[in-house]
Image (tube, helix red, strand yellow):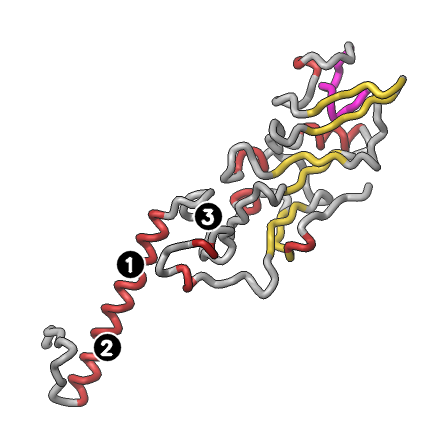
């Protein structure tokens, strides 16, 4: 079989040779294209690193991408979509803190003040069985001390979340929901989330609490 690849200036001698000539060049072009795509994906240094998705369509930096292959990215639809955490399905397993490509996680605890009882004994703040209600670290359920407790008037206290310290472990959410009003919820903070096409947390969530939704419907709050 003739394996010679003709140059652009040479003419094939027959129709069969002509088709072979065309097919060879198409195969070479495809090899170069897909080889280049693989190289760019390996070298990608965007937040989250390579391998977070099967396409680049969800990448927040796609518009600024200088790769010659970025035009191949498939958009996620006419409306931008984001990852949503459904608090009604969330079981506070702790994987939001450990599976996110960002550290600390883009998932944070959000406080619904309209649902809060402003309790002196807050189950989302204190360790179960705490006998002395002080803000000492050993009394707090939050491993990073992200919850702030402020005295209002007897017997009411206000609790706020320092999002810079919150790691999204959900420990406070679990105990608040079990013994309190359930005013603490986990949510994806979209000012932090890099919107991976294939979210690592969603892939490992045992409750299936994550889904893709339009950006204008990003937050879903449990009302009870």
Closer to the camera in the image, 212 or 202: 212
Magenta span dominant secondary structure: loop
Q: Disc 2 to disc 1, how far (Cα)?
A: 18 Å
Residue 172: which quarter of the image?
A: top right
First in sequence: mark 1 vs mark 3: 1
- For the N terminus, give its image quadrant: bottom left
Give percent across and percent down for residue 179. Answer: 80, 28
- For the C terminus, give its image quadrant: top right
Q: Disc 3 to disc 2, how far (Cα)?
A: 34 Å
Q: Badge 1: how crowded within 10 Å, few (<14), some, or many (20+)?
A: few
Disc 1, disc 3: CB below 8 Å? no
Task: Residue at the far top: name it.
Answer: 132
Q: Badge 3: how crowded within 10 Å, few (<14), some, or many (20+)?
A: some
Q: Is residue 183 left or right of residue 96?
A: right
Disc 3, disc 2: CB below 8 Å? no
Residue on which disc 1 sits: 35
Residue on which disc 3 sits: 52
Name the residue at 69% across, 18% down.
140
Residue on which disc 2 sits: 23
């Amino acid at each position: 079989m003739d394996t010679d690849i003709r140059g652009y200036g040479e003419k094939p001698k027959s129709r069969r040779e002509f088709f072979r000539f065309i097919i060879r060049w198409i195969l070479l072009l495809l090899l170069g294209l897909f080889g280049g795509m693989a190289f760019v994906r390996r070298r990608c240094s965007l937040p989250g690193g390579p391998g977070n998705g099967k396409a680049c369509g969800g990448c927040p930096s796609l518009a600024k991408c200088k790769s010659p292959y970025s035009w191949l990215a498939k958009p996620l639809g006419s409306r931008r979509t984001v990852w949503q955490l459904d608090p009604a399905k969330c079981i506070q397993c702790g994987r939001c803190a450990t599976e996110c490509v960002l550290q600390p996680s883009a998932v944070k605890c959000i406080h619904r003040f309209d649902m809060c009882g402003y309790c002196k004994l807050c189950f989302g703040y204190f360790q179960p069985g705490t006998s002395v209600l002080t803000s000492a670290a050993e009394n707090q359920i939050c491993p990073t001390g992200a919850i702030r407790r402020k005295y209002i008037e007897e017997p009411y206290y206000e609790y706020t979340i320092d999002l810079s310290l919150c790691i999204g472990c959900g420990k406070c959410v679990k105990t608040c929901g079990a013994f309190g009003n359930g005013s603490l919820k986990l949510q994806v903070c979209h000012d932090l989330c890099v919107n991976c096409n294939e979210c690592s947390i969603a892939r490992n969530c045992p409750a299936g609490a994550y889904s893709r939704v339009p950006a204008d419907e990003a937050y879903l709050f449990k009302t009870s």
